[in-house]
Amino acid sequence: MPWLTSLSWPPERSLMEKTVLIVDDDDKLSKMLGFLFMAKGFKAEYARNGGDALDKLKGIKPGVIILDIMMPGMDGYEVCRKIKEDPATKDIPIIALSALSETQGKEDMISLGAYYYFEKPFKSSDLVEKAIEALEKS
């Protein structure tokens, strides 16, 4: 499993107690990403859709949000827009994920306030690296 190469143990102390909120309707991908982030010292929270993510944000303040774009119901564009409009959550970095390889989608997410945009498939180590970078800059 190539994604295992990005793991390090023990987790990095600077990330201990940071939370990542993973918003994706693909349970396998969510759990795999959660495992990767936990190996780096993060706590992982999960939301299966946009509405669930917005509800979770009423009770937690993650250090970073990993947000799928193509989800049933409320898509990632709308979720990003709502997060960035809310003064309580507007400063949380968002990293968008999409199976679509369209330039317009990437530009739209960045213009809505996403920190970065990855097309699926992506290198998990690159995603974790970008999340850590976003935390350090926020």
Image (cartoon, rainbow, N blue to C red):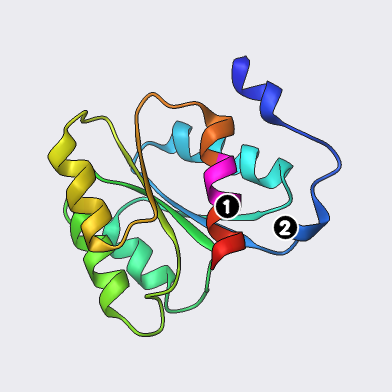
Judged left or right of residue 101, residue 32 is right
**Residue 8 appears in which quarter of the rendering?**
top right
Q: Is residue 132 shown above or below 61?
A: above
Judged from the image, the secondary structure of the residue bearing numbered disc 2 is helix
Judged left or right of residue 5, residue 76 is left
Judged from the image, the secondary structure of the residue bearing numbered disc 1 is helix
Q: Is residue 117 magenta?
A: no
Q: Which residue is found at the position 31% from the left and 81% from the top? A: 86
Q: Which residue is found at the position 72% from the left and 31% from the top? A: 7
Q: Which mark, residue 15?
A: 2
Using the rendered image of the protein, determine whether residue 98 is visible from the camera's viewpoint.
Answer: yes
- Which residues lie in the magenta part? 128-132
Check the picture and name the quadrant holding the N terminus: top right
The x and y percentages for residue 100 are: 21, 31
Q: Name which residue type carries label 1.
A: Glu
Neighbour tally class for label 1: few under 14, some 14-19, many 20 plus, Cα within 10 Å: few
Residue at image mark 1: 133
